[in-house]
Image: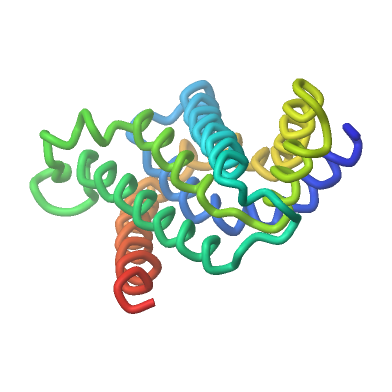
Amino acid sequence: MILEAILLGLSTGTYCTMYCAPVLIPFLSGTEKVSYKRNSGLIGAFLGGRLVTYFILGAAFAAIGLLVNEFMDPLLAHKLSVYAYLLCGLSLLVNSLGIKFPWGCGDGCRVPKLRRVGNDWITSICAGLAVGLHVCPPLWTAIVRSVFGGKGLSGFFYFIFFYIGTLPFFIPLFGIPFVAKRLPAIKKVARVTQVCVSIYFMIFLGLIPLIFG
Protein backbone atom coordinates (compact mmCIF):
# COMPACT_ATOMS: atom_id res chain seq x y z
CA MET A 1 0.00 0.00 0.00
CA ILE A 2 2.86 2.37 0.83
CA LEU A 3 4.62 1.60 -2.45
CA GLU A 4 1.38 2.16 -4.36
CA ALA A 5 0.91 5.55 -2.68
CA ILE A 6 4.49 6.68 -3.45
CA LEU A 7 4.26 5.55 -7.08
CA LEU A 8 0.93 7.32 -7.46
CA GLY A 9 2.57 10.47 -6.08
CA LEU A 10 5.45 10.17 -8.53
CA SER A 11 2.96 9.84 -11.38
CA THR A 12 1.44 13.24 -10.54
CA GLY A 13 4.76 15.09 -10.61
CA THR A 14 4.10 16.63 -14.01
CA TYR A 15 0.78 18.05 -12.77
CA CYS A 16 2.50 19.53 -9.72
CA THR A 17 5.16 21.13 -11.93
CA MET A 18 2.57 22.55 -14.30
CA TYR A 19 0.59 24.25 -11.53
CA CYS A 20 3.33 25.13 -9.03
CA ALA A 21 6.34 26.20 -11.12
CA PRO A 22 4.73 29.36 -12.62
CA VAL A 23 3.91 30.42 -9.06
CA LEU A 24 7.02 29.43 -7.13
CA ILE A 25 9.85 30.24 -9.55
CA PRO A 26 9.16 33.99 -10.02
CA PHE A 27 8.03 34.34 -6.38
CA LEU A 28 11.10 32.69 -4.84
CA SER A 29 13.50 34.31 -7.31
CA GLY A 30 12.15 37.80 -6.61
CA THR A 31 12.21 37.86 -2.80
CA GLU A 32 14.20 40.73 -1.28
CA LYS A 33 16.05 38.49 1.16
CA VAL A 34 17.79 35.60 -0.57
CA SER A 35 19.17 32.74 1.51
CA TYR A 36 19.02 28.96 1.47
CA LYS A 37 17.32 28.84 4.87
CA ARG A 38 14.65 31.38 3.96
CA ASN A 39 14.09 29.81 0.54
CA SER A 40 13.64 26.38 2.12
CA GLY A 41 11.22 27.81 4.68
CA LEU A 42 9.08 29.45 2.00
CA ILE A 43 8.96 26.23 -0.02
CA GLY A 44 7.95 24.35 3.13
CA ALA A 45 5.20 26.89 3.87
CA PHE A 46 3.88 26.56 0.32
CA LEU A 47 3.90 22.76 0.43
CA GLY A 48 2.27 22.82 3.87
CA GLY A 49 -0.54 25.05 2.61
CA ARG A 50 -1.04 22.74 -0.35
CA LEU A 51 -1.26 19.70 1.93
CA VAL A 52 -3.81 21.42 4.18
CA THR A 53 -6.06 22.11 1.19
CA TYR A 54 -5.83 18.47 0.14
CA PHE A 55 -6.97 17.34 3.58
CA ILE A 56 -9.82 19.86 3.57
CA LEU A 57 -10.95 18.70 0.11
CA GLY A 58 -10.81 15.07 1.19
CA ALA A 59 -12.89 15.74 4.29
CA ALA A 60 -15.38 17.93 2.42
CA PHE A 61 -15.86 15.50 -0.47
CA ALA A 62 -16.31 12.61 1.95
CA ALA A 63 -18.86 14.60 3.98
CA ILE A 64 -21.03 15.52 0.98
CA GLY A 65 -20.83 12.07 -0.57
CA LEU A 66 -18.81 12.87 -3.70
CA LEU A 67 -16.22 10.16 -3.06
CA VAL A 68 -18.13 7.38 -4.76
CA ASN A 69 -15.61 6.42 -7.43
CA GLU A 70 -12.20 7.36 -8.83
CA PHE A 71 -13.57 9.74 -11.46
CA MET A 72 -14.07 13.37 -10.55
CA ASP A 73 -16.72 15.54 -12.17
CA PRO A 74 -14.71 17.61 -14.71
CA LEU A 75 -17.06 20.58 -14.26
CA LEU A 76 -16.36 20.66 -10.52
CA ALA A 77 -12.62 20.31 -11.14
CA HIS A 78 -12.79 23.24 -13.57
CA LYS A 79 -14.61 25.45 -11.07
CA LEU A 80 -12.11 24.65 -8.34
CA SER A 81 -9.25 25.49 -10.70
CA VAL A 82 -10.81 28.85 -11.55
CA TYR A 83 -10.98 29.78 -7.87
CA ALA A 84 -7.44 28.49 -7.43
CA TYR A 85 -6.15 30.82 -10.14
CA LEU A 86 -8.07 33.78 -8.70
CA LEU A 87 -6.76 33.29 -5.17
CA CYS A 88 -3.24 32.48 -6.26
CA GLY A 89 -3.09 35.45 -8.61
CA LEU A 90 -4.37 37.78 -5.91
CA SER A 91 -1.75 36.53 -3.45
CA LEU A 92 1.06 37.05 -5.95
CA LEU A 93 -0.21 40.50 -6.94
CA VAL A 94 -0.42 41.72 -3.32
CA ASN A 95 3.07 40.39 -2.68
CA SER A 96 4.49 42.01 -5.81
CA LEU A 97 3.00 45.39 -4.86
CA GLY A 98 4.54 45.12 -1.38
CA ILE A 99 8.13 44.70 -2.60
CA LYS A 100 10.44 47.08 -4.44
CA PHE A 101 9.82 47.16 -8.15
CA PRO A 102 12.79 47.47 -10.52
CA TRP A 103 11.54 50.72 -12.01
CA GLY A 104 10.94 54.34 -10.95
CA CYS A 105 10.96 56.06 -7.54
CA GLY A 106 14.72 55.97 -7.09
CA ASP A 107 15.63 52.41 -6.11
CA GLY A 108 12.13 51.07 -6.59
CA CYS A 109 8.46 51.54 -5.68
CA ARG A 110 6.26 49.69 -3.23
CA VAL A 111 2.89 50.03 -1.51
CA PRO A 112 3.72 50.21 2.23
CA LYS A 113 0.22 49.21 3.37
CA LEU A 114 0.52 45.91 1.50
CA ARG A 115 3.89 45.14 3.04
CA ARG A 116 2.44 43.15 5.93
CA VAL A 117 -0.48 41.37 4.28
CA GLY A 118 1.67 40.62 1.25
CA ASN A 119 4.81 39.48 3.01
CA ASP A 120 6.62 36.43 1.67
CA TRP A 121 5.44 34.01 4.35
CA ILE A 122 1.74 34.84 4.06
CA THR A 123 2.01 34.77 0.28
CA SER A 124 3.70 31.37 0.32
CA ILE A 125 1.01 29.85 2.56
CA CYS A 126 -1.89 31.44 0.65
CA ALA A 127 -0.45 30.39 -2.71
CA GLY A 128 -0.03 26.84 -1.41
CA LEU A 129 -3.62 26.76 -0.17
CA ALA A 130 -4.83 28.07 -3.54
CA VAL A 131 -2.76 25.70 -5.70
CA GLY A 132 -4.16 22.79 -3.68
CA LEU A 133 -7.54 23.45 -5.31
CA HIS A 134 -6.21 22.08 -8.60
CA VAL A 135 -7.53 18.52 -8.35
CA CYS A 136 -5.70 16.36 -10.87
CA PRO A 137 -6.74 12.73 -11.60
CA PRO A 138 -3.93 11.14 -9.50
CA LEU A 139 -4.82 13.41 -6.58
CA TRP A 140 -8.49 12.45 -6.83
CA THR A 141 -7.50 8.79 -6.90
CA ALA A 142 -5.33 9.28 -3.80
CA ILE A 143 -8.19 10.99 -1.95
CA VAL A 144 -10.57 8.15 -2.80
CA ARG A 145 -8.02 5.49 -1.86
CA SER A 146 -7.10 7.20 1.41
CA VAL A 147 -10.77 7.43 2.43
CA PHE A 148 -11.94 3.99 1.31
CA GLY A 149 -8.71 2.03 0.95
CA GLY A 150 -7.90 1.91 4.65
CA LYS A 151 -9.29 2.56 8.06
CA GLY A 152 -8.15 5.31 10.36
CA LEU A 153 -4.39 5.85 10.29
CA SER A 154 -3.80 3.55 7.31
CA GLY A 155 -5.87 5.83 5.07
CA PHE A 156 -4.16 8.89 6.51
CA PHE A 157 -0.68 7.47 5.87
CA TYR A 158 -1.67 6.44 2.36
CA PHE A 159 -2.28 10.07 1.52
CA ILE A 160 0.90 11.20 3.32
CA PHE A 161 3.05 8.80 1.29
CA PHE A 162 1.27 9.86 -1.88
CA TYR A 163 2.22 13.44 -1.05
CA ILE A 164 5.81 12.42 -0.32
CA GLY A 165 5.94 10.88 -3.78
CA THR A 166 5.25 14.29 -5.33
CA LEU A 167 8.04 16.08 -3.44
CA PRO A 168 11.11 15.11 -5.56
CA PHE A 169 9.86 17.39 -8.32
CA PHE A 170 10.34 20.38 -6.00
CA ILE A 171 14.02 19.67 -5.25
CA PRO A 172 15.38 22.01 -8.00
CA LEU A 173 13.65 24.95 -6.25
CA PHE A 174 16.09 24.68 -3.35
CA GLY A 175 18.86 25.82 -5.71
CA ILE A 176 17.23 29.17 -6.51
CA PRO A 177 19.42 31.15 -4.03
CA PHE A 178 22.53 29.77 -5.77
CA VAL A 179 21.39 31.31 -9.06
CA ALA A 180 19.85 34.49 -7.61
CA LYS A 181 23.03 35.46 -5.71
CA ARG A 182 25.19 35.11 -8.82
CA LEU A 183 22.79 36.77 -11.24
CA PRO A 184 21.25 39.86 -9.55
CA ALA A 185 19.26 40.68 -12.69
CA ILE A 186 17.22 37.51 -12.08
CA LYS A 187 15.50 39.21 -9.15
CA LYS A 188 14.26 42.13 -11.30
CA VAL A 189 13.08 39.83 -14.07
CA ALA A 190 11.33 37.62 -11.52
CA ARG A 191 9.41 40.53 -10.01
CA VAL A 192 8.16 41.69 -13.39
CA THR A 193 7.25 38.09 -14.23
CA GLN A 194 5.39 37.74 -10.93
CA VAL A 195 3.20 40.72 -11.78
CA CYS A 196 2.49 39.36 -15.26
CA VAL A 197 1.69 35.90 -13.94
CA SER A 198 -0.64 37.26 -11.24
CA ILE A 199 -2.57 39.38 -13.76
CA TYR A 200 -2.77 36.49 -16.22
CA PHE A 201 -4.04 34.14 -13.51
CA MET A 202 -6.65 36.58 -12.24
CA ILE A 203 -8.01 37.83 -15.57
CA PHE A 204 -7.54 35.13 -18.20
CA LEU A 205 -7.69 31.99 -16.04
CA GLY A 206 -9.91 33.38 -13.29
CA LEU A 207 -12.38 36.17 -14.03
CA ILE A 208 -13.02 35.44 -17.72
CA PRO A 209 -13.82 31.72 -17.23
CA LEU A 210 -15.81 32.57 -14.09
CA ILE A 211 -17.99 35.15 -15.84
CA PHE A 212 -18.23 33.71 -19.35
CA GLY A 213 -17.44 30.03 -18.74
Residue at point 67%, 38% (across, down): 171
* Percent of width and height locating residue 151: 80, 26
In the image, farthest residue toward the left: 105
The residue lying toward the viewer, choosing from 139 and 187, is 139
The residue lying toward the viewer, choosing from 69 and 37, is 69
Residue at point 89%, 41% (across, down): 4
Residue at point 53%, 45% (across, down): 132
Q: Is residue 46 left or right of residue 33?
A: right
Q: Is residue 19 left or right of residue 121?
A: right
In the image, farthest residue toward the bottom: 212
Seen in the picture, residue 108 relative to 207 is either above or below; the reply is above
How many callouts does the rendering have? 0
* Percent of width and height locating residue 49: 50, 33
Seen in the picture, residue 149 relative to 103 is either above or below; the reply is above
* Percent of width and height locating residue 206: 36, 64
Q: Is residue 63 left or right of residue 165?
A: left
The residue lying toward the viewer, choosing from 74 and 203, is 74
Please state, as top left, top right, bottom left or bottom right, where the N terminus lies in the image.
Answer: top right
Residue at point 37%, 73% (across, down): 209
* Percent of width and height locating residue 191: 33, 50
The residue lying toward the viewer, choosing from 8 and 65, is 65
Please state, as top left, top right, bottom left or bottom right, where the C terminus lies in the image.
Answer: bottom left
**Color theme of the render:** rainbow
